[in-house]
């Protein structure tokens, strides 16, 4: 299986077009450690060279699992990103929101992340949910205590690149324009039914040579496996909420129809659709089972979708397209 790489903007890292997101394979989601370890082992032996985790994933277990996998696969050229944030799930939770502007506390959490990862250096460290007011990030300058910490650690060689990970595309575009970020992970920003990163993020990232990582590929599972009965019930009962607006459900059902008519699984279509865009440098779908990862890797190995099929998907994404009705990436509260 051949996995192609793309340059992750000015980080200078060549990352595989598909990486591994490590949010949902911890004990928090009832996934046995043996399964999580098998997922990581398959990723690393299959040529995946980019793994993304975060402090809050499994209250630290995500970073620990990645660290152990890196120990098992010593010598592999693996690029790792983690995130600082959701501090109520970290070793400084006793400080409450004060921790977000306390440089000593922030440094403590980062050192703990490195300890769990069993590394003295991480390729990318991101601000998790940069739109949260508690960070005190100035959208025009990027000034904030967390940036003081990250830039200091970067100058010391402890981290290689500074990133951000979240759902709010406007905040991400604003912060890219400050020139202080090397890459951005946008969750839910590019799916089969909606691509809010196209409004500002793609062009802004290209102008600043900022690497773009896409999470939330499967729209919280709705584009991982077909859930037609559930969507039809939502439509029938009018039981909308969160990301499930009338327009979003209509588009999801249209995608299911397209999958049925082409014989392509919704998982494969979701991954290969994003691969069509050269402005996206890597996709990081998660996995709770080894089989999930096998399917993701097989889809990526097939490369981008044909142009005619891509056009049909883009037509679906334009169905009844009032921008205020479609669930944008800022509408979810799930962690990136």
Image (cartoon, helix red, strand yellow):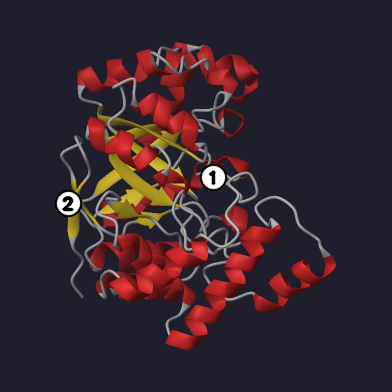
Q: Is residue 142 left or right of residue 336?
A: left
User: Badge 1: how crowded within 10 Å, few (<14), some, or many (20+)?
Assistant: many
Residue 13 against residue 315 in the figure, above or below: above
Kind of element beneath mark 2: loop
Q: At which x and y percent is residue 77?
A: 17, 51
335 relative position to 122: left or right: right
Q: Position of residue 312 (x, y in %)?
A: 42, 72
Q: Which residue is mark 1?
A: 329
Q: 93 or 277: nearer the eye?
A: 277
Quadrant of the image containing the N terminus: bottom left
Q: Are marks 2 and 1 in contact (CB under 8 Å)?
A: no
Q: Position of residue 102 (x, y in %)?
A: 50, 12
Is 218 placed above or below 147 here?
Answer: below
Q: Is residue 123 left or right of residue 185?
A: left
Give the residue at x 62% y 19%: 97
Front in this rendered view, residue 70 or 44: 44
The kind of secondary structure element at disc 1 is helix
Q: Position of residue 212 (x, y in %)?
A: 32, 43
Q: CA distance from mark 2 to mark 1?
A: 32 Å
Q: Give the foreground label among 2 and 1.
A: 1
Q: Which residue is mark 2?
A: 77
Taking depth in this image into account, of 6 and 312 the one nearest to the observer is 312
- What mark, if any, has residue 14 been given in the picture? none
User: Mark 2, residues whose alpha carbon is within 10 Å: few (<14), some, or many (≥20)?
Assistant: few
81 relative to 224, above or below: above
Q: Is residue 295 above or below residue 109?
A: below
Residue 45 visible here: yes
Query: Which residue is painted at 41% across and 19% down in the image?
Result: 107
């Amino acid at each position: 299986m051949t996995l192609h790489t793309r340059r992750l903007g000015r980080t200078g890292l060549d990352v595989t077009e598909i990486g591994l997101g490590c949010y949902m394979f911890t004990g928090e989601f009832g996934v046995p450690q043996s399964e999580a370890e098998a997922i990581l082992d398959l990723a690393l032996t299959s040529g995946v060279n980019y793994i993304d985790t975060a402090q809050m994933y499994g209250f630290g277990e995500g970073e620990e699992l990645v660290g152990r996998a890196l120990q098992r696969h010593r010598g592999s050229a693996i690029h790792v990103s983690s995130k600082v944030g959701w501090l109520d799930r970290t070793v400084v939770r006793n400080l409450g929101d004060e921790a977000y502007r306390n440089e000593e506390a922030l440094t403590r959490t980062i050192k703990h992340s490195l300890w769990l990862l069993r590394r003295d250096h991480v390729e990318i460290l991101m601000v998790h949910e940069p739109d949260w007011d508690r960070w005190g990030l100035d959208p025009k300058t990027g000034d904030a205590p967390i940036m003081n910490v990250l830039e200091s650690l970067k100058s010391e060689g402890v981290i290689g690149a500074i990133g951000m990970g979240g759902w709010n595309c406007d905040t991400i575009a604003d912060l890219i324009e400050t020139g202080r970020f090397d890459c951005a992970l946008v969750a839910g920003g590019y799916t089969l039914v909606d691509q809010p990163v196209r409004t500002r993020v793609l062009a802004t990232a290209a102008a600043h040579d900022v690497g773009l990582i896409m999470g939330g590929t499967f729209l919280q599972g709705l584009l991982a496996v077909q859930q037609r009965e559930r969507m039809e019930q939502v439509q029938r009962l009018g039981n909308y909420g969160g990301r499930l607006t009338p327009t979003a459900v209509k588009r999801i059902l249209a995608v299911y129809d397209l999958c049925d008519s082409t014989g392509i699984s919704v998982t494969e279509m979701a991954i290969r659709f994003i691969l069509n865009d050269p402005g996206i440098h890597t996709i990081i779908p998660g996995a709770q089972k080894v089989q999930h990862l096998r399917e993701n890797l097989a889809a990526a190995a097939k490369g981008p979708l044909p142009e005619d099929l891509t056009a049909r998907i883009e037509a679906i994404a334009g169905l009844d397209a009032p921008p205020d009705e479609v669930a944008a990436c800022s509408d979810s509260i799930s962690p990136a």
